[in-house]
Amino acid sequence: MYIPEEKISEILNTSDIVDVISETVILKKSGRNFFGLCPFHSEKTPSFSVNASKQIFHCFGCTAGGNVLSFIMKYHGITFPEAAKMLARRYNITIETKEIDPAKRRELHLKEGLFRLNKTVMGVYFDELKNLNPGDKASKYLKQRDISEDIIQQFRLGFAPDNWESIVKVLRDRKISKNMAVQCGLILERKQKTGYYDRFRNRIMFPIFDVNMQVAGFGGRVMDDAMPKYMNSPETPVYNKSRILYGLHAAKQFCRQAGFVYIVEGYFDFLSLYQHGIKNTVASLGTALTPDHVRILKGYASRIVLVFDSDAAGISAAKRSIKIFLKEGVDTRVLVLPEGDDPDSYVVKHGHEAFNELAKNAKTIMQFLLQVSIDTHGLSVEGRIRILDDMKQQLILIQDSALRSLYVKELAETLNIDEKAVLEKVRELYLNRTAKRSSLIDEKKDDDKLESDRREEQMISLMLNYPEIIDEIKNREVLDYFYSEKLKRIAKKIISVDPGKKAFITDVMARMETNEDQEFIASYAMNDSASEDIRKTALSLMNRIIRVRTKQENTLNSKIISAEKGCDSDLMDLLKQKQAEIQQLHDRF
């Protein structure tokens, strides 16, 4: 599918980048821009900026930037045509498509086919459950778990029969490609290659929706003690476990309203809390939480509450997750339920008010880790030394120095150890790790950036923010004096856009072919510090660029000519080599 350029322009001119990004990032207005926590890297202080008038975003921390299409592509991990289609649907824009290259077409068709197949199979599983007699095992099991008909309907729960070829038969009857079903993870090929069999059998089925309400995969649970208790779809082109959270498609609006989100481990934990009115909840699909999960949730809530069972497995799961939350700098609490309870059983026995009241006393991450370490080692002299060793590993992960200092003080008081001694232990570990990291990283210094590149970047910034100077740049052929080939290439694309157009930045961004170039444009379009006389500033900069390039080239050329006249071949070679090095250095930027 090829989307015509005029249709892309319509999508960009119709969409509102602030509205679109606000669905996944909490934005607050500050001056002319909106700011929030970047969804593409971990940070505690907002450095992610959105400019409504220019319809661009830029992160001053990780340099991500671009227009609304760039954001959709990067955030959802999808292709340009998929992002364009998503926005077109949102704004009721009809896309008349043209042909694209065969490889891209196959990729898009595969994803669309997988989504369609998952939706079809979801309907099959749902009908299987609906058509069961009340006395059948699956119906009785869901009734015992106190799952209502409304929840079954809303989340399209289903049943996979105890049959090796139930879905295989559906595929055969409906003439659906078995190869597609294999790629979906719904069926498997027999070892002897004599046919196929169903992956999910005799299980309650949970369709897994992505945030766009499409069925990305499935989870299945047995109704007895058989193992494995839970089984999920494998990774596929449409199902990425590190980015999908169960129930987020239904819970996201409630997370925004409450300002925080509960994370539970299982499907039934989620469904039970949701059914009892605790709708700001998601489940982790039984897999380890990832930085992507945390960054996605940060777009819907400023606080995260991890809810775990009180058994050894629950404590272990909480400890595994904590490192990610510390690095991401998000306000995180840990709620460990009373012994013998999980979220499902607790809310069924005590109700949602009791659960919310219990959650108010959820521990901070450090309080939780300290309690676990005390329970493990005790408070003897040897135990306190081991606790200190445990806790210093966590304290160095806290990026906020003030917060780290408060936790050091709390730890020292709890263990009855001098605060300076605790601080010294933490500092010692931090310095050791920093030294190791520094020895492995080849630091790139600002000095490597040539002065001429800075001037050329200033010129590009002026062109983007004050397009009225572009005609003068063209007349004086300033770009011919640019050293950097990269900056010259970008500048030529900028001057190819009509500077009188209202959506000038939007059109410039659309001409950039790579993410790197889009990020560059977003960065310099944000730098719009006003000057009293823009034309005077621009003329001065143009003169400087032309003069420096001319002078440097004339100086080198003169020296080379003098060396030729003096027959000093060694000097001539050195000068030519220097000339080439200067050009190569500029070409890198």
Image (cartoon, rainbow, N blue to C red):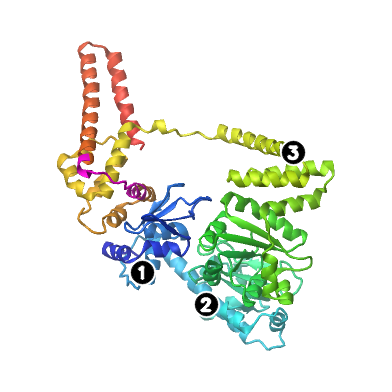
* 59 up-or-down from 100: above or below: above
Q: Is residue 82 visible?
A: no
Residue 570, given in percent of the width and then of the height, sits at 30, 14
Residue type beneath disc 2 = Thr
Residue at the image position 68 percent from the left and 44 percent from the top:
408
Q: Is residue 468 visible?
A: yes
Residue pointed to by mark 1: 88
Residue at the image position 65 percent from the left and 73 percent from the top:
273
519 relative position to 302: left or right: left
- The label on residue 560 is none
Residue pointed to by mark 2: 120
Q: Which of marks 3 and 1 is in front?
A: 3
Question: In front: 382, or 567?
Answer: 382
Question: In front: 130, or 342?
Answer: 342
Residue pointed to by mark 3: 418
* 589 up-or-down from 358: above or below: above
The residue carrying pointer 3 sits among few (fewer than 14), some (14 to 19) or many (20 or more) residues within 10 Å by Cα, namely few
Residue type beneath disc 3 = Asp
